[in-house]
């Protein structure tokens, strides 16, 4: 049953990151983070959103690095966790892109 938990880990990381980035978006709008400019000309709001996205991508990448590539056992038990990891990583990379690139609030 460990393979089942590993199979759901990728989408779970995406779901947590998706929720966190959108929560940061709402918090930033409520607290006027777009008005705060940081070094390099980026506003605090986008800096926080990009940081949340990168942390989520990093967690997905760490999951993928930790999954076994091959081994004994049923094909389903070996392949499904990697498939779930790729689904989570791909979803993180694509579904959070509009929040990062669009204008704030």
Image (cartoon, grey):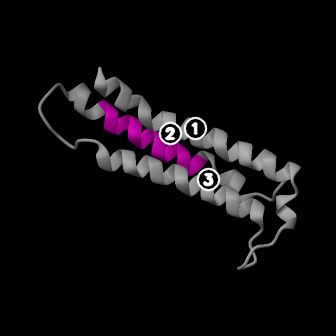
Please tell me how crowded label 2 is: few (under 14), some (14-19), or many (20+) other residues with Cα within 10 Å.
many
Q: Is residue 88 magenta?
A: yes
Q: Which residue is mark 3?
A: 52
Is residue 17 depicted above or below 8 in this figure?
below
Q: Would you say the residues marked 3 and 2 are in contact, meaning their CB atoms lie under 8 Å apart?
A: no
Which residue reaches farthest front?
31
Taking the image as shown, residue 16 lies to the left or right of residue 8, namely: right
Judge whether residue 98 is colored magenta.
no
Quick check: marks 2 and 1 in contact, CB under 8 Å? yes
Q: CA distance from mark 3 to mark 2?
A: 12 Å
Q: Which residue is mark 2?
A: 13
Front position in the image: 43 or 93: 43
Residue topped by disc 1: 16
The answer to whether residue 75 is above or below residue 20 is above
Left or right position of 35 against 74: right
Residue positioned 65% across, 43% down in the render: 20
- Farthest residue toward the top? 1
- Residue 97 position within the rendered picture, expressed as x and y whole percent measured from the top left: 64, 53
**Image coordinates for residue 100, horizontal then vertical, percent:** 69, 57
Query: Which residue is drawn at the image coordinates 45% and 39% (left, top)?
Result: 87
For the residues marked 2 and 1, what is the alpha-carbon distance in whole angstroms?
Answer: 5 Å
Name the element at disc 2: helix
Q: Main secondary structure of the magenta part?
A: helix
Query: 36 or 15: which is nearer to us?
Result: 36
Label 1 – label 3 distance at C-alpha: 10 Å
Quadrant assignment for the N terminus: top left
Q: Which residues are magenta?
A: 80-94
């Amino acid at each position: 049953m460990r393979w089942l938990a590993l199979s759901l880990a990728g989408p779970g990381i995406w779901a947590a990151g998706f929720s966190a980035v959108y929560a940061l978006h709402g918090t930033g709008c409520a607290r006027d983070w777009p008005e705060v400019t940081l070094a390099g000309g980026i506003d605090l709001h986008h800096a926080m959103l990009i940081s949340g996205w990168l942390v989520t991508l990093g967690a997905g990448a760490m999951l993928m690095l930790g999954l076994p590539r091959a081994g004994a056992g049923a094909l389903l038990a070996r392949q499904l966790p990697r498939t779930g990891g790729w689904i989570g990583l791909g979803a993180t990379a694509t579904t959070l892109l509009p929040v990062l690139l669009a204008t704030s609030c």
